[in-house]
Structure formats: structure tokens, C-alpha cells
Image: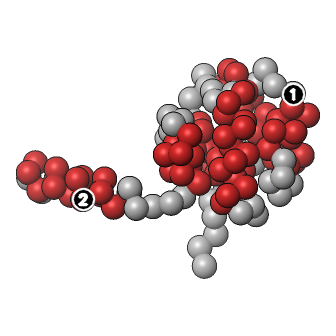
């Protein structure tokens, strides 16, 4: 594929992505948060078995307190659970957020790994089953 065609495809994809309304995208649009691999990961974790509207609001409250692994690890499980409530399984998700964040800081210097194999090797992160 030549460069001109490649850039055309990228522009099409950018325009199409604007139409998506996933919680992580909605969060960045409505609240001005910078989407990072970390905030997308945490938003995705919050979204499991939770309505999108609830996820967006909970993530907004959480990221006001901590939007990086270093800031997140300074919070207690109880603090996280309190701000993410009423997401489903909020106590377990608060625990998972801290566990995942600790692993990211210790093993990956706070950076979300970009390989699926490394990412899914972290307890609490997995692929959504295909239907």
C-alpha cells in the first residue's frame, strides 16, 4: 500500500471512530480527560456488568482523584470503592484496580503493556469471549 492510500485509510478510520460511543470515548469527549492506555484499561474494567452511563460517571469521579498508576496506588480500596459506586461489583473492582495498578508499577514501570499476551497475563485482565 502506498503512503497516499494509507493516509486516506487512516483519515477514514479517524472519522468513523468519532461515531463510536464507548464509555472510554464518551468520558474523554464529555469530561475532557486524556485517553491513555491506563484510563482506557480502568474504564474497561469498570464497564463490566455495568451500564455505560454509570461507567462514565464512575470513571469521571475516579479520574478526578487519580488518572495515572502513581496517583491511583496512593488511594485506598475503600476510597476507590466509594467513588466508583454504583458500578456493579464495586468492592471487587476497587480491589482489582489496585492489584492491576500495583503490577503495572512493579513489572511494567507504570506502563500498560502493548502486547495482548503480556496484558492478559495480569490477573484481572482477560479477553472478552467471542460470541
Q: Is residue 128 left or right of residue 94?
A: left
Q: Is residue 107 visible?
A: no
Q: Is residue 44 above or below residue 64?
A: below
Which color mode does the image show? secondary structure
Residue 100: x %, y % from top left: 73, 37
- Name the residue carrying label 2: 12
Give the residue at the far bottom of this rendering: 131
Where residue 70 sits, quadrant-wise, is: top right
Q: Is residue 59 left or right of residue 23?
A: right
Give the residue at the far front of this rendering: 30
Question: Which residue corresponds to the image point at 16% horizontal and 55% vertical from the top-left?
Answer: 8
Q: Is residue 63 visible?
A: yes
Question: Which residue corresponds to the image point at 84% horizontal and 52% vertical from the top-left?
Answer: 86
Q: Secondary structure at mark 1?
A: loop
**Mark 1, other Cα within 10 Å: few <14 / some 14–19 / many ≥20:** few
Q: Is residue 18 left or right of residue 37?
A: left
Question: Which residue corresponds to the image point at 54% horizontal and 35% vertical from the top-left?
Answer: 33
Question: Closer to the camera, 45 or 58?
Answer: 58
Q: Which mark is residue 97?
A: none
- CA distance for labels 2 and 1: 43 Å
Q: Quadrant of the N terminus?
A: bottom left
Where residue 58 sits, quadrant-wise, is: top right
Mark 2 vs 1, N-terminal side? 2
Count of residue discs: 2
Question: Which residue corresponds to the image point at 10% horizontal and 48% vertical from the top-left?
Answer: 3
Residue 40: x %, y % from top left: 57, 44
Where residue 106 sits, quadrant-wise, is: top right
**Mark 2, other Cα within 10 Å: few <14 / some 14–19 / many ≥20:** few
Residue 75: x %, y % from top left: 81, 25
Question: Closer to the camera, 88 or 105?
Answer: 88
Q: Secondary structure at mark 2?
A: helix
Q: Which mark is residue 76?
A: 1
Amino acid at each position: 500500500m502506498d503512503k497516499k492510500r494509507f493516509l486516506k485509510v487512516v483519515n477514514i478510520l479517524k472519522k468513523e471512530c468519532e461515531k463510536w460511543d464507548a464509555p472510554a470515548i464518551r468520558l474523554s469527549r464529555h469530561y475532557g480527560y486524556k485517553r491513555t492506555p491506563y484510563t482506557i484499561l480502568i474504564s474497561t474494567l469498570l464497564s463490566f456488568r455495568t451500564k455505560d452511563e454509570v461507567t462514565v460517571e464512575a470513571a469521571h469521579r475516579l479520574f478526578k482523584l487519580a488518572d495515572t498508576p502513581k496517583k491511583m496506588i496512593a488511594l485506598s480500596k475503600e476510597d476507590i470503592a466509594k467513588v466508583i459506586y454504583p458500578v456493579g461489583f464495586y468492592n471487587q473492582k476497587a480491589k482489582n484496580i489496585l492489584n492491576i495498578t500495583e503490577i503495572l508499577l512493579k513489572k511494567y514501570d507504570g506502563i500498560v503493556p502493548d502486547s495482548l499476551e503480556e496484558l492478559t497475563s495480569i490477573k484481572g485482565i482477560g479477553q472478552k469471549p467471542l460470541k
